[in-house]
Amino acid sequence: MARLKEKYLKEIVPMMMEKFSYRNRLEAPKLEKIVLNVGIGRATENIKLLETAAQELAQITGQHAVVTRAKQSISNFRLRTTNPIGTRVTLRGVRMYEFLDRLINIALPRIKDFRGISVKGFDGRGNYNMGLKEQIVFPEINYDKIQEIHGMNVTFVTTAKTDKEAEELLRQFGAPFAKGK
């Protein structure tokens, strides 16, 4: 069992039940999935960038990345419907907990001048979005072999009904939220 899943079952659920006065263990919010999304705007010009981004995302997550395609044509961007423009991965189960563990304990502390993640990323329904400016904060990426530095969006989908519950859940997992915001 993943380290964070064990922590969730033994420590976080009882603490959340006490703090939010849930009557049942199943009422306590849990992490459903983590979605990583990389958008490559220049993929219309150079398809190799998209292939390397998909390979890097697969290295980071340990799961095959899916190519996302444009839903609309936008002439100003020379974009046609069904052009490949990004990649994404949806993590669930053991891989999700292992990725969360690596993100919190290894990748985030490697960010230069890191002061914590913003609490403004909640969507009002208990989900959290955060952006990473570069993929090289993950130790799986070989710095010498990357073609281009690109960012990614990380979405944490929880069963929490409010942002306060979701924030407390992520704090208990060890998410380093910025102080005073």
Image (cartoon, helix red, strand yellow):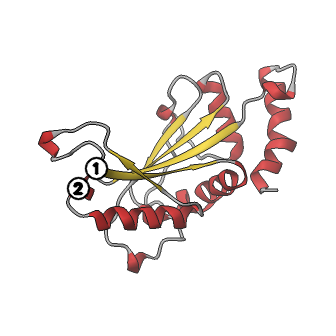
The residue singled out by tag 1 in the image is 83
Rendered view: 22 above or below 154: above
**Which of the two residues, 107 or 115, is positioned nearer the viewer here?**
107
Look at label 1 and name its amino acid. Answer: Asn
Q: Is mark 1 on a helix, strand or loop?
A: loop
**Residue 83: x and y, percent?**
28, 49
| Among the two numbered marks 2 and 1 on one chain, the one whose residue lies closer to the N terminus | 2
Q: With 175 as the anchor, is 58 left or right in this view?
A: left
Q: Is mark 2 on a helix, strand or loop?
A: helix
The residue singled out by tag 2 in the image is 44
Marking on residue 74: none
Q: Residues within 10 Å of mark 1 (few under 14, many from 20)?
A: some
**Which of the two residues, 13 or 63, is positioned nearer the viewer here?**
63
**Residue 46: x and y, percent?**
24, 64
Look at label 2 and name its amino acid. Answer: Thr
Q: With 102 as the anchor, is 116 left or right in this view?
A: left
Residue in the picture at 62% in, 46% down: 175
* Distance (Cα) linking label 2 and label 1: 7 Å
| Residue 130, visible in the rendered structure | yes
Q: With 134 as the anchor, is 140 left or right in this view?
A: right
| Residue 181, visible in the rendered structure | no
Q: Answer with the quarter of the image where residue 80 lies.
A: top left
Mark 2–mark 1 CB contact (< 8 Å): yes
**Which of the two residues, 44 or 105, is positioned nearer the viewer here?**
44
- Residue extending farthest to the front is 82
Q: Answer with the quarter of the image where residue 143 lies.
A: bottom left
**Residue 41: x and y, percent?**
26, 52
Residue in the picture at 31% in, 43% down: 70
